[in-house]
Image (cartoon, helix red, strand yellow):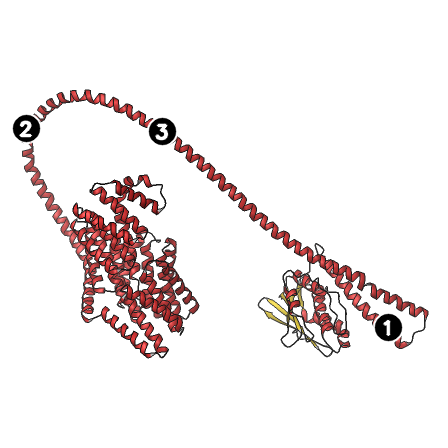
Amino acid sequence: MKRYLVNAQFVSKACFSKKGMLFLFFSFLCMASFSQVNAPQKKLDSLLSLNQKNLKTDSTKIKILTEVYRQYMRMKNVDKAEEYVDKTIQLSHEKSLQKFSAMAYYRRGLMYHGRSNYQKAEENYQNAAAEFSSVGNLDMVAGTYLNLGALYGSIPDYVKSLEVNQKAIAIYEKMGNETDMASCYTNISTIYQSLGNQSQALVYMNMALKVFAKGGENTRGVAVVYGLIGTNYFEASDRELKEMDVLPNQKIKLALAYYNKSLRVSEAIGDIGLIATVKRDLADLYSSIGQKDAAIKSYQKSVELNKSGENKEAYASSLYALGNFYQKENDFENAILLLNNSLKIAEENRLLDIEKQSSLGLSTVFEKQKDYNKSLAYYRQYIAVRDKIFDQEKEKEITRRQMQLDFGIKERDYLLKQKLTEGELKRQQQELELKRQQLVLSDKEKALDLLTFQKAKADLDIQRLAQDSKFANAKFEAKLAAGIKDKQISKQVQQIKFDERVKLFLTIATTLILIIAVVIFFNQRKTTRLNKIINNQKRELEQLSKVKDRIFSVVSHDMRTPVNSLISFMQLLEGTNIEQEKLNRYAAVLKNNLTYTSTMMENLLNWAASQMQGFNPYLESLDIHELINEVILSLQDNANVKSLVIKNLVPAKTFCKADSNMFMLVIRNIISNAIKFTPSGGTITTSAAPNGDVLEIKISDTGIGLTPVQVEHFNKPGYLGAGVSTLGTNKEKGTGLGLLLCRTFISLMDGKISADINPTGGSYFKIILKK
């Protein structure tokens, strides 16, 4: 899908802004009283009021009517704009002021061109060209032809487009107007591009780019040409790439580079229409190289940008491009919806190229769905539209025009050199003829000088007498005028001083309001930040309070029981003879209680140490295989009681950065928990695997496992472990502080710990430490 309307908008904008200077002085005089009115409606009301007050049908009335219809055009009120354009044209013809009616036709053509109403736009452009020609305004004649070239390219009617572009080039060449000639080159390049002659299109594009770049990198012309060059490389065949000295494997890279250049410039100047076009072209490129996600995002962005605009051709093109993409992906529902919308817009606005492609796209979709009746109907429509665009006579005419244009470009340099040589000879001949004529005139001038002198002397005598009387009258009138002017100046000075005081007061008031608003804003932000910090600290204190309560509960209750048991056992030993069997049983119970108490004390002391300021781990490279073996060996007796198997699958010589005491305490607590909650005959497994620059250590069991609520609670970032201890499978007790220690020490060692449920039963803990 080509971009003729993109060029039309560029050309129209260039010409329109240039010609708009014609009314600058008048607008300043007539609209000074409205300079402070910002709202378009208020400005329009003021213009309408001025029109009603001016009852004369003269050039001033025409200028007022011109400003009225231009304001309606800015407000997109087409009907009212039409009404006042007609009034302007009628009055201009009555007063034989065709320069105003020509500009009215031209601007109405621009209005319809921007709305893709090509029939009305063409009619007004042709009327404008005829009237500009009648008043000798060749610059605007060429500008009108330039816009017609872009319009015919959008239909497309390549023969007419080439014809009017040739006419514009001929005029601009005589005037030495390089910038607008570059716009013609741009339009011609798109025609070659549409005809599949990419190498010749590139010649015209480079000619245009060279001229546009003189005005700076961030200009609309540069953005348009960059995008066209990207399309040129993207659509070129291998043969055409060879003609352009480009390898086939370089085409995508070159196309992407120029599309990105065009997008950068378009975004810099804020041109929504160009951004949408480049997004669509980028989507086509992404689709061709299999980047489907990037393609669909770019297609959707193009549709979104064009939907809000008035350029119906661009919107229809974007809808077709996205629908065709869905068709290729076999998303038939979206493809049919988008292609139907594109076809409807094309039919309503005589966009033959888009109508042709949308019909073919719908035919393909229904063919894939095996709905051959609809497929055939749309294919017939495609053939009919294609035949409208290309017939044999047009193809012959296009070929002739192409040869004529190519010859004209090559011939231009030779003619320029020839003109310079002939011009120098003519200049010398003219100088000789001028000197001869000057000699002849010199004799006649001497004779006339004497008569002129005598007549001038008599005239001076008469004037001297008249001036004496006038001088006295002028002196008196000057004195009166000076007095009136002094009073006016005094009033103006006072008004200026008053205005300055008002401006100063408003400036100071505005500044104070802004300062107060900024202070309030930053105070609110600071307050919000402090509230967040306080809330976080409050939550942490609440968690620490729960931990403290748990510790006091453990110290007050769980430590008292084993000590009392020990005292009672000692009293039994002192007072009575106990049978060996009972003694062994009591000793086993006492050992279990004391082991629990020892573990609890160790955890409490370690946790207390971790809360002290200045308690830092000593990180070094450790062989965790050996450390885990030591922990397993120390807990083997507890595991044997329940006939549990503890496997160390960590490979030998597996190293990571850790503090040896902290690491062993963490592993001991996790394996102790696994022993506690794993029924007899179960298995506990430790393993490790490198993952980039970290080591992942996994400890799993086949026990009763954690509940989803416990897993979620443990994995929370703010976990402080103030939970209630749960009895093990053999009624083993715990403190509820083990996992808190694990979480605290792993964090101190700059690592991470998490828990989850094994799919086959039980649970596991994963520790991540740096290598």
Residue 717 in which image quadrant: bottom right
Position of the C terminus, as image quadrant, is bottom right
Q: Nearer the viewer, mark 2 or mark 1?
A: 1
Mark 3 touches mark 1? (CB < 8 Å): no
Mark 2 touches mark 1? (CB < 8 Å): no
The residue tagged with tag 1: helix, strand or loop?
Answer: helix
Q: Residue at x 32, y 27 (%)?
A: 489
Which class describes the residues within 10 Å of circle 1: few (<14), some (14-19), or many (20+)? some
Mark 2 touches mark 3? (CB < 8 Å): no
Q: Is residue 251 visible?
A: no
Q: Nearer the viewer, mark 3 or mark 1?
A: 3
Indicate the position of residue 662 as horizontal and vertical percent values: 70, 64
Residue 297 in which image quadrant: bottom left
Which class describes the residues within 10 Å of circle 3: few (<14), some (14-19), or many (20+)? few
- Residue type pointed to by label 2: Leu
How far is the residue under mark 2 from the one under mark 1?
A: 157 Å
Q: Between residues 566 and 121, which one lies in front from this camera angle?
A: 121
Q: In the rendered image, which residue does mark 1 sit on?
A: 586
Q: Residue at x 40, y 33 (%)?
A: 500
Which class describes the residues within 10 Å of circle 2: few (<14), some (14-19), or many (20+)? few
The residue tagged with tag 3: helix, strand or loop?
Answer: helix
- Residue type pointed to by label 3: Val
Q: Quick check: 334 above or below 549?
A: below
Residue 109 in which image quadrant: bottom left
- Residue type pointed to by label 1: Tyr
Q: Earlier in the sequence, mark 2 or mark 3?
A: 2
Indicate the position of residue 280 as horizontal and vertical percent values: 37, 64
Q: Between residues 444 and 224, which one lies in front from this camera angle?
A: 224
- Identify the disc placed on residue 451: 2
Q: Quick check: 712 above or below 125?
A: below
How far is the residue under mark 3 from the one under mark 1?
A: 114 Å
- Identify the disc placed on residue 493: 3
